Amino acid sequence: MGYDILFIHPPSVYDFRKRAFFPGPVDVTVPIYTHQFIMFPVGLVSIAEYLERHGYKVKIFNLGEQMLADPTFDAEKYISKTESTVYAIDLHWCVHSQGAIEVARICKKHHPNSFVVLGGLTATRFHDEVIRGYWFIDGVLRGEAEEPTLRLLENLEKHKRLKETPNLTYRDRSGRVRVNPLQAVCNDLDRWEFTRLDLVTPNNLLLSFSNEEKTWNLPICRGCIYNCVSCGGSRYSYKKLFGREKPAFRSPFRIVEDLQVLKEQGIRHIFLFQDPRIGGKRYWRMLTRSIRRENMDDLSLLFELFSPADKEFLKSFSRLGAETGFTISPESGVESVRKAHGRNYSNEQLLRTVKNCLECKLTLSVFFMIGLAKQTRNTLRETYKLCEDICRMNLHSELYGRNFNVWVSFGPMILLDPGSLAFDYPEKYGYRLIFKKFKDYYLAMSKPAWHQWISYETSFLTRRDIFDLILQSGIFMVRIKEKYHPYFHRGLEPDPLELAELNLTLFNILSNEFIAEEVDYISKIED
């Protein structure tokens, strides 16, 4: 069966199964999506559904998942046997820089007459370099792409006038690079569908969660009102790269519909990303009322907090009926470091939110980051102290049994988001770029070990410092989990499997030092 368009989600590194590959902690904040980042932007689903709605044959093939699930799967052979007018490869997160390019190369090799196009945030930021540097890529669709992808298919089908395709960067017949204007963004997220997972093959690993339950992500809005300096999805980035001046929201009614559809598909864990408060009090109140009216008792819902939350807000969400939790990312335990990153609130406000979540019986995951511009070894020690304060509060929770009601975690920033404020104005925000061009990301992700992927330094931390602090924070997390685990404070029998997993985690962290030294030594010999 031929397709009008075949979307391919690449692995982060195309040939990871055939080469030395040491991803380290690159996936520590999203372990269920693996070191190949098999989760794709949910916008792929909305684009694919929109095209199908207009009569086109579409499919999303999760190549990264298939390569992980089946060690014998021949990716190039599979691609060679497909038939599609357009091959569309997402390059949203920069971690896919190598994988996306290599998959595009294979598509053009076996289908020279098909149109090979890239899209996503990273592709948008580097559109000119990509179209000039990789002859086998015919175009880059910049920005938000539902309508532009439809226009691309129509233009290819009818009269091949690419200059009439909005958002498209391409080479004309003379080889000259053309950059078409951005189309006005859609301000009504209800136009799109995000639950058509039947369009995705395969999706078993993608949807799998702990205890073999399934999870999926839904957007509350598209766009942001905050300017966190290292984020490629900030207000600044959306405006510059996508032409979006303000967020577009999905109505509470449509979100409830989405939840019902996912529930019918057997999906119980649903992450609704973006802070509901961005839409204002009227919006989030309507959202909680709408969810409460439905039977959502067997769902597990996770929401984001971009700043501390008051008791009224948290109480409203505690009455949804579903198991409900939140995430918040203060990034640092030192307020001045946090403020410089774009998050302007105090530790007192954060701890009050922790207390309110405990009282409302809501789970809360608190994320800190390694790689902040004003972070030092001393500020990291202060962050460790705040982590312990949070864990001690958790000891007194009514729900504190075998699991943590409130938990802390560290996310290592290995790759700086292209298109973020820190990337575009590094000196102003306290960064020094090691990777400045797309080719730098591509070549780095072609190297075997994660410490070679660190794309920046800061005013206070060298690349080696960042590597050391990432490992140190990993060891801290193992120790703190041992120290505050419920079985030490509730007289419970330790779970041997969980203890073994902690020991394995510690071993893997400690082994990274040796691996990095060996990789660097071998690299010097090869050079």
Image (cartoon, grey):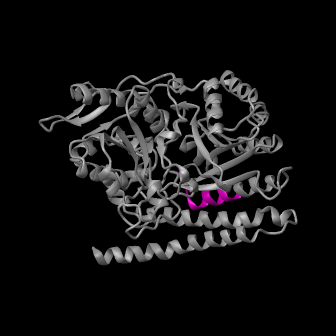
Q: Report the quarter where the C terminus lies.
A: bottom left
Rendered location of residue 133, percent (x, y): 23, 48
User: Along the horizontal axis of the image, is 109 left or right of 87?
Assistant: left
Q: Is residue 295 left or right of residue 10?
A: right
**Closer to the camera in the image, 59 or 445:** 59
Specify the quadrant of the image occupied by residue 67.
bottom left
For residue 312, side relative to residue 252 (left or right): right
Q: Main secondary structure of the magenta part?
A: helix
Question: Which residue is drawn at the image coordinates 22% and 44% (left, top)?
Answer: 132
User: Residue visible at 68% across and 72% down?
Assistant: 500
Q: Which one is nearer the viewer's eye here, 353 or 429?
A: 353
| Residue 375 belongs to the span the image colors magenta | yes
Residue 464 visible from this viewpoint: yes
Magenta stretch in the rendered image: 374-385
Q: Give the quarter of the figure containing the N terminus.
A: top left
The image shows a total of numbered marks equal to 0
Does residue 511 sit above or below 392 in this rendering? Answer: below
Residue 437 visible here:
no
Q: Position of residue 376 (x, y in %)?
A: 55, 58
What residue appears at the point 26 percent right and 44 percent down from the top-left corner?
137
Q: Is residue 2 magenta?
A: no
In the image, taking residue 161 as reference, residue 31 lies left or right, namely: right
- Residue 491 vs 213, above or below: the answer is below
User: In the rendered image, which quarter is residue 12 located in?
Assistant: bottom left
Frontmost residue, 385 versus 72: 72
Give x and y (percent) for residue 513. 50, 73
Single out the residue that lies furthest toward the left: 174
Most extreme residue toward the front is: 1
Residue 485: horizontal and vertical position, in percent?
77, 63
